[in-house]
């Protein structure tokens, strides 16, 4: 009888600690700069990020916001969505998706169903 021995190897999906240790000194210097400047919201560091991110995205502008809900809200405003419009949202979303639409548009929660032909 031929018996095979299986050896389980743990392959890390993402090693955040290893990544952090590679840039730790640079990160700590920047954190100290921000704390010393007390520019926690807005200011030079946010402006630097916005400019760098816009360049990375090859666009003229980028705006840093506090969370994804605010980003969704700004996206809806930029698209001109408002009173009388309908916005379709997956029913299995996080509630913040709908909160991001803080305007008078109608929120339509849609239940997603996968149709398998022949069944």
Image (spheres, rainbow, N blue to C red):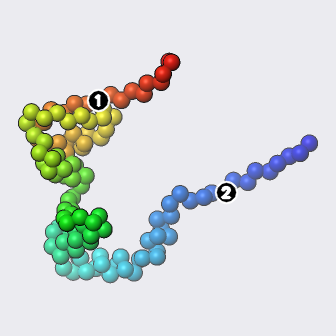
Does residue 70 appear in the picture of this structure?
Answer: yes
Residue drawn at point x = 27 percent, y = 66 percent: 58
Label 2: element kind: loop
Question: Between residues 21 and 111, which one lies in front from this camera angle?
Answer: 111
Q: Is residue 55 above or below residue 30?
A: above
Residue drawn at point x = 30 percent, y = 32 percent: 91
Image coords of residue 76 (percent x, y): 16, 46
Question: Between residues 87 and 32, which one lies in front from this camera angle?
Answer: 87
Count the numbered circles shown.
2
**Upstream in the sequence, badge 2 or badge 1?**
2
Image coords of residue 102 (percent x, y): 13, 42
The residue indicated by pointer 1 is 110
Q: Is residue 112 left or right of residue 69?
A: right
Does residue 53 appear in the picture of this structure?
Answer: no
Quadrant placement of the N terminus: top right
Image coords of residue 115 (percent x, y): 43, 24
Residue drawn at point x = 47 percent, y = 24 percent: 116
The alpha-carbon separation of the residues under discs 2 and 1 comes to 42 Å
Q: To which quarter of the image does residue 9 belong?
A: bottom right
Q: Residue furthest left?
A: 83
Q: Is residue 115 above or below residue 70?
A: above
Question: Between residues 81 and 92, which one lies in front from this camera angle?
Answer: 81
Q: To which quarter of the image does residue 52 belong?
A: bottom left
Image coords of residue 7 (percent x, y): 73, 54
The residue indicated by pointer 2 is 9
Disc 2 crowd rating (10 Å Cα; few below 14, some 14-19, many 20+) is few
Label 1: element kind: strand
Disc 1 crowd rating (10 Å Cα; few below 14, some 14-19, many 20+) is few
Q: Is residue 13 above or below residue 82?
A: below
Q: To which quarter of the image does residue 81 belong?
A: top left
Residue drawn at point x = 69 percent, y = 53 percent: 8
């Amino acid at each position: 009888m031929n018996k095979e021995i299986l050896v389980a190897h743990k392959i890390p999906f993402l090693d955040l600690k290893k990544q952090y240790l590679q840039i730790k000194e640079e990160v700590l210097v920047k954190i100290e700069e921000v704390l010393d400047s007390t520019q926690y919201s807005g200011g030079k560091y946010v402006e630097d990020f916005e400019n760098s991110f816009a360049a990375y995205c090859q666009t003229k502008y980028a705006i840093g916001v506090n969370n994804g809900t605010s980003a969704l809200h700004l996206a809806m405003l930029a698209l001109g969505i408002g009173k009388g419009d309908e916005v379709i949202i997956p029913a299995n979303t996080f509630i913040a998706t709908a909160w991001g639409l803080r305007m008078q548009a109608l929120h339509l929660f849609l239940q997603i169903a996968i149709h398998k032909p022949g069944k």
